[in-house]
Image (cartoon, grey):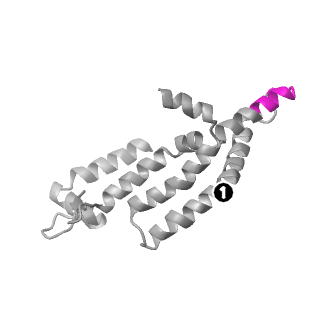
Amino acid sequence: MFALLGFCSFNALANTSPATAVDSLSQSVPFLSTQKGSTGIPAVSVTVNPDGSEDYSVTLQILALMTVLGFLPAIVILMTSFTRIVVVMSILRQALGLQQTPSNQVIIGIALFLTFFMMSPVLDRINAQAVQPYINEQITAPQALEKAKVPMREFMLKQTRVKDLETCKGF
């Protein structure tokens, strides 16, 4: 079956000229058009405004967003109480004498729920102070990041002992 399918597709490709293949591909995928005046793939660009600020093309903005989404699990682990909750629940499981009864997946699921429950006031403040004004185009992206830092920094400082901060400051 696969040999017959492979033979038929090879035969179809062998009977097609390269120009015909490119034209048929460009008709089905608009940004691969080979005609003059076609827009093609939008360029990656950074424009500098007269006031010194920079505007990034949508392509670069999407790239930055995808990069941040890739680091999202690390952000959740490092900037929230997720790790504490997982450790406490694992110790509780061992203290009850249970080996693997609530599996690690269940513990992690409960820890994620509790983490988002604990972080909801902070996330609400970030949404109200930074995200919504940015979506409504009242502030720029750098201003939104600065406004989002404040509630997150306050939350993280409340969760850290002064002695630990002094130790890190000494390094």
Please give the range of residues in magenta: 90-99
* Amino acid type, residue under disc 1 in the picture: Ser
Question: Relative to 7, does residue 145 appear above or below in the rendering?
Answer: below
Q: Quadrant of the N terminus?
A: top left
Q: Residue at x 64, y 36 (%)?
A: 161
Percent x, y of residue 39? 21, 67
> Callout 1: 10 Å neighbours few (<14), some, many (20+)?
few
Q: Is residue 96 magenta?
A: yes
Side (left or right) of 115 relative to 10: right
In the image, what residue occupies the spot 66% across and 57% down?
A: 120
Q: Nearer the viewer, residue 18 or 117?
A: 117
Q: Nearer the viewer, residue 31 or 94?
A: 94
> In this orientation, which residue lies closer to the viewer: 162 or 89?
162
Above or below, comparing residue 126 to residue 81 in the picture: below
Q: Quadrant of residue 55?
A: bottom left
For label 1, the SS is: helix
Task: Give percent across and percent down for residue 121.
Answer: 66, 58
Image position, residue 47 (x, y; %):
22, 61
- Residue 79 image offset from top left, x and y in percent: 57, 43
Farthest residue, direction right: 96
Name the residue tied to disc 1: 120
Q: Residue at x 12, y 68 (%)?
A: 36
Vertical arrangement, residue 11 with respect to residue 50, above or below: above
Q: Along the horizontal axis of the image, is 89 left or right of 60? A: right
Q: Residue at (14%, 70%) from the top-left corner?
A: 37
The picture quadrant where one finds residue 53 is bottom left
Report whether 50 appears left or right of 64: left
Does 153 appear in magenta? no
Q: Is residue 34 above or below residue 163?
A: below
Q: Main secondary structure of the magenta part?
A: helix
